[in-house]
């Protein structure tokens, strides 16, 4: 008794989805809905059917229509001003975020908007950010019209409150310049050093001098510009009385450069400039690889990017647009179907059915009657409602929750607990000790060699191998994770994932899809005619439970006569269908029983005779039971849900008797429980999706937000995971653990090189040539180890 | 013998000059490419280039359309 499946497999020409209820056959093509057909017509009229030639079925389903006046707020001059980036007497430049953009056809269509409307001068797409910069002639077309044009071809711009005070992070190019220059200098210094390594005739002293001075000249940009990255970081850490990994590297760069300048000035050697610039170059490459962040994703979203930019206000029966910050007390707001409630208020008109699943974790919409208080953050489903604002936006329960101090805690937990820095510190002391010891030794034996030996030790033993292996491994692991759709905020998070021992899940939206699709019926068998009548009744209501029942019947009851339909808020529906009274609703509504309801079930009765009940099960995401069983072996697993306890038995069985499984959890409760677990000495990973998890996600040592689509709103978190990949969580954690092992392994290899190098160094015998051979060998072997092992571990874990 | 050696060295100098100038060109090209924003968006240009062959279409929207004004 699963959900009914359809036998038709006609694909929509526009969106590629199966045409379920009806197929529109027109122009020799099939469309699943009116919306898809309309988009096709627009494109066809303008001769832009190339759109369909570039990718197959490139469109997105247009089944859900966008409300006609949705962009009315774009007529408001103040709002326009906050959105546009440039305006002169003729043109306006505006950037729209278009989350629907997904393929090359989209790119093509959006860059050819001018063919749809001649008043659009140009549009340029940034695919990574899913944005389109549109330039248009504002005399002839308004911002609203542009937005509506985009919507008409299936790309509805997403405009949120966040757009008002948005500062876009600029892509930092300075590291790329630094890397380019370091690479250039490194290659040339290397080339200039060859003659001497290969044994140039001492008679060619002039030539040697020229080469040396040229090398020195080329090394200046490296020391003064390219390496500045490391100076800044080292200086910052020293100011905080802490030695990070960059500090010993800066020391090594300075010592190498100083020693080389000294050698060249005194004409005693050519110095180690090639090794130095090579190391700086490789380290910059590693840094860039590691810092390659996902600029299309925002990890710092707050409620402002969830809220709309403007809503409709009723003013003496006239509708007007008001931007969100301007909503005042006692305003009457008109909330349309699928719109968000922006402030706390009292319902004054209409029947509210509010989906709070994102805010509270309740999986079922809440019904409200006139006069009841409705809280901000919920989404209205069904007809339009009016509400009286009783608290300003900034004062509402939701925003207050967000502005609590705990949530504001700086998320950048200090990097000092990183084991790499710990090793680096340890390593630095050993190197300093070794350097001083060899200096002391030579002071006794042969004072001429003090300088040579002591500096050589510092040159050879710089922890750059450690830094290299760390940055390259991190960079590669981040890339592997993102290929598998887990996007981490930065490389530090890998280490934090590896160290956790407690995993806390949210239920609604995280483990489950949040949709009720799993229905099972128990009771007397239902005849075909009853099923038809049931379908007719159930399709009268917008409530997701009756919708689900209507779909379950797999019957079409639209032609049946339904009279005396009545819907009792929060309880059920009844009507006379073809002469028979059918009732569908809660146990109390149908059977009159006063016992408390413990499960998500609705009952059906015909002419007063109770036939049976429909049990609603949360639909769990793919392979969730397997994942939980895997995780249980190594970690403590808990579930904190804002929903009712209907699933308790099932989950308890899955997680084990001792596991925490708590229901009816408010956002604060979740936060407090995470805190409590941490105080007990656990390192907690929180996995959640909604605003109600926001506090817990921040409080946890690592918070991962689960999203159906990474472009959707997610609360601030350390990482974003695509919901379809949640079942790979265990592999992700294991890969993060492998990260540490790989860094350690390559570090041990680099220590071997260090021993060889130091063997020469302490004797004062380190020639530039030995340094020049050791440096690239060690760097390259470390790169091979890190790339090889991290890809191997990913392959073994069956990750992409 | 000495003369031969001298020739070898002058070849090296020549090569060095050549290589440094070529490398400088590459460096300049690299810096230009970073500056002109080629690393800002790595996804759309590879796709955009696929549309070149289509009739009635030029990739450079800006130029194409400012003429139309």
Image: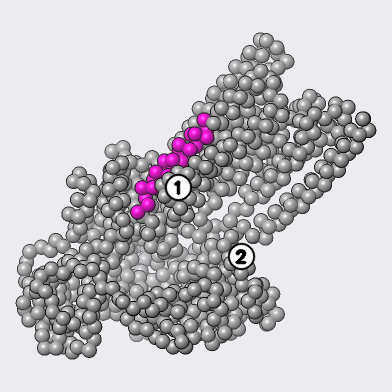
Q: Is residue A453 left or right of residue A517?
A: right
In this view, the residue in front, A240 or A247, is A247
| Residue under label 2 | B45
Q: Position of residue A694 (x, y in %)?
A: 35, 55
Horizontal side of A508 relative to A71 (left or right) equals: left
Residue A678 image offset from top left, x and y in percent: 31, 41
Quarter of the image with the N terminus of chain A is: bottom left
Q: Are marks 1 and 2 on the same chain?
A: no
Q: Is residue A699 above or below residue A110?
A: above
Tell me the crowding category of disc 2: few under 14, some 14 to 19, or many 20 or more residues within 10 angstroms, Cα based. some
Percent coordinates x, y for residue A472 in the rendering = 54, 43
Is residue A667 something that shows in the picture? no
Image point 7% across, 81% down: which residue? Answer: A607
- Residue A313's spot in the image, x, y percent? 37, 78
Q: Residue furthest right?
A: B3
Q: Secondary structure at mark 2?
A: helix
Q: Which mark is residue A216?
A: none
What chain is tagged by disc 2? B
Q: CA distance from mark 1 to mark 2?
A: 31 Å
Does residue A419 appear to the left or right of A461 in the view shown? left
Instruction: Determine the residue positioned at 57% across, 62% down.
Output: B43
- Disc 1 on helix, strand or loop? helix
Instruction: Say which of marks 1 and 2 sits in front.
Output: 1
Instruction: Please check the rendered image and state whether residue A730 is part of the magenta-colored stretch, yes or no.
Output: yes
State which chain disc 1 sits on.
A
Q: What residue would you read off at disc 1?
A: A795
Rendered residue at 39%/45% (across/down): A733
Mark 1: few/some/many CA within 10 Å (<14, 14-19, 20+): few
Above or below residue A380? Residue A34 is: below
| Along the viewing direction, whichever of A492 and A53 lies nearer the viewer | A53
């Amino acid at each position: 008794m699963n959900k009914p499946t359809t036998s038709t497999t006609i694909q929509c020409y526009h969106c590629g989805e199966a045409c379920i209820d009806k197929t529109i056959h027109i122009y020799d093509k099939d469309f699943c809905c009116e919306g898809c057909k309309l988009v096709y017509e627009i494109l066809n009229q303008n001769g832009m059917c190339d759109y369909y030639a570039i990718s197959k079925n490139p469109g997105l389903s247009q089944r859900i229509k966008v409300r006609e006046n949705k962009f009315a707020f774009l007529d408001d001059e103040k709002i326009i001003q906050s959105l546009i980036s440039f305006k002169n007497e003729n043109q306006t430049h505006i950037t729209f975020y278009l989350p629907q953009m997904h393929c090359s056809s989209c790119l093509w269509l959006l860059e050819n908007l001018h063919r749809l409307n001649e008043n659009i001068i140009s549009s340029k797409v940034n695919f990574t950010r899913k944005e389109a910069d549109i330039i248009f002639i504002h005399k002839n077309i308004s911002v609203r019209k542009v937005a509506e044009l985009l919507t008409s071809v299936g790309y509805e711009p997403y405009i949120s409150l966040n757009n008002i005070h948005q500062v876009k992070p600029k892509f930092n190019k300075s590291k790329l310049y630094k890397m380019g220059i370091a690479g250039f200098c490194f290659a040339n210094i290397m080339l200039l050093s060859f003659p001497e390594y290969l044994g140039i005739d001492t008679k060619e002293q002039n030539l040697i001098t020229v080469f040396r001075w040229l090398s020195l000249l080329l090394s200046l940009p490296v020391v003064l510009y390219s390496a500045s990255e490391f100076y800044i970081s080292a200086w910052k850490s020293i100011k905080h009385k802490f030695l990070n990994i960059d500090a010993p590297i800066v020391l090594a760069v300075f010592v190498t450069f100083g020693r080389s300048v000294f050698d060249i000035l005194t004409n005693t050697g050519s110095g180690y400039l090639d090794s130095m610039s090579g190391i700086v170059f490789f380290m910059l490459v590693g840094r860039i690889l590691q810092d390659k962040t996902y600029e299309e994703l925002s990890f710092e979203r707050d409620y402002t990017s969830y809220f709309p930019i403007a809503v409709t206000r009723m003013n003496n029966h006239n509708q007007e647009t008001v931007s969100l910050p301007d909503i005042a007390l006692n305003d009457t707001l008109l909330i349309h179907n699928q719109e968000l409630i922006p402030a706390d208020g009292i319902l004054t008109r209409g029947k509210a059915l509010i989906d709070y699943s994102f805010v509270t974790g309740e999986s079922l919409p809440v019904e409200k009657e006139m006069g009841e208080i409705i809280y901000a953050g919920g989404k209205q489903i069904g007809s339009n409602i009016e509400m009286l604002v009783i608290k300003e936006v900034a004062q509402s329960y939701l925003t207050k929750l967000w502005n609590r101090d705990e949530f504001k805690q700086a998320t950048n937990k200090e990097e000092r607990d990183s084991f790499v820095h710990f090793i680096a510190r340890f390593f630095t002391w050993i190197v300093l000790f070794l350097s001083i010891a060899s200096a002391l030794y030579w002071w006794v034996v042969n004072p001429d060699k003090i300088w040579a030996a002591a500096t050589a030790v510092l040159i050879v033993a710089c922890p750059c191998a450690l830094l290299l292996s760390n940055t390259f491994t991190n960079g590669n692991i981040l890339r592997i994770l993102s290929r598998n759709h887990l996007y981490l905020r930065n490389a530090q998070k890998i280490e934090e994932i590896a160290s956790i021992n407690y995993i806390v899940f949210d239920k609604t939206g995280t483990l489950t899809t949040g949709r009720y699709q799993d229905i099972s019926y128990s009771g007397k068998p239902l005849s075909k005619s009853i099923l038809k009548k049931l379908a007719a009744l159930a399709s009268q209501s917008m409530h997701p439970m009756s919708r689900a029942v209507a779909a379950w019947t797999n019957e079409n009851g639209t032609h049946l006569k339904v009279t005396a339909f009545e819907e009792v808020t929060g309880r059920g529906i009844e009507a006379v269908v073809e002469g028979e009274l059918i009732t569908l609703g809660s146990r109390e509504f149908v059977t009159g029983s006063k016992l408390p309801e413990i499960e998500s079930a609705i009952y059906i009765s015909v002419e007063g005779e109770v036939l049976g009940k429909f049990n609603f099960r949360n639909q769990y995401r793919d392979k969730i039971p397997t994942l939980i069983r895997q995780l249980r072996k190594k970690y403590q697993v808990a579930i904190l849900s804002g929903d009712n306890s209907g699933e308790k038995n099932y989950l308890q069985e899955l997680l084990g008797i001792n596991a925490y499984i708590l229901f009816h959890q408010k956002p604060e409760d979740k936060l407090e429980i995470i805190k409590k677990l941490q105080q007990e000495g656990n390192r907690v990973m929180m996995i959640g999706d909604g605003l109600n998890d926001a506090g817990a996600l921040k409080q946890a040592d690592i918070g991962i937000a689960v999203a159906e689509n990474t472009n959707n709103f997610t609360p601030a978190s350390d990482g974003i995971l695509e919901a379809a990949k949640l079942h790979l969580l265990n592999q992700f954690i294991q890969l993060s653990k492998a990260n540490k092992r790989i860094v350690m392994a390559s570090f041990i290899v680099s220590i071997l090189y260090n021993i060889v190098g130091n063997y020469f160094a302490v004797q004062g015998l380190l020639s530039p040539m030995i340094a020049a051979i050791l440096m690239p060998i060690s760097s390259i072997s470390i790169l091979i180890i890190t790339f090889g092992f991290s890809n191997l571990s990913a392959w073994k874990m069956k990750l992409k | 013998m000495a003369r031969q050696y001298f020739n070898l060295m002058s070849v090296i100098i020549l090569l060095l000059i050549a290589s440094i100038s070529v490398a400088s060109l590459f460096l300049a090209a690299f810096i230009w490419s970073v500056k002109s924003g080629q690393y800002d968006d790595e996804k759309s240009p590879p796709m955009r280039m696929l549309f070149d062959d289509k009739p009635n279409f030029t990739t450079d929207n800006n130029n194409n359309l400012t003429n139309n004004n």
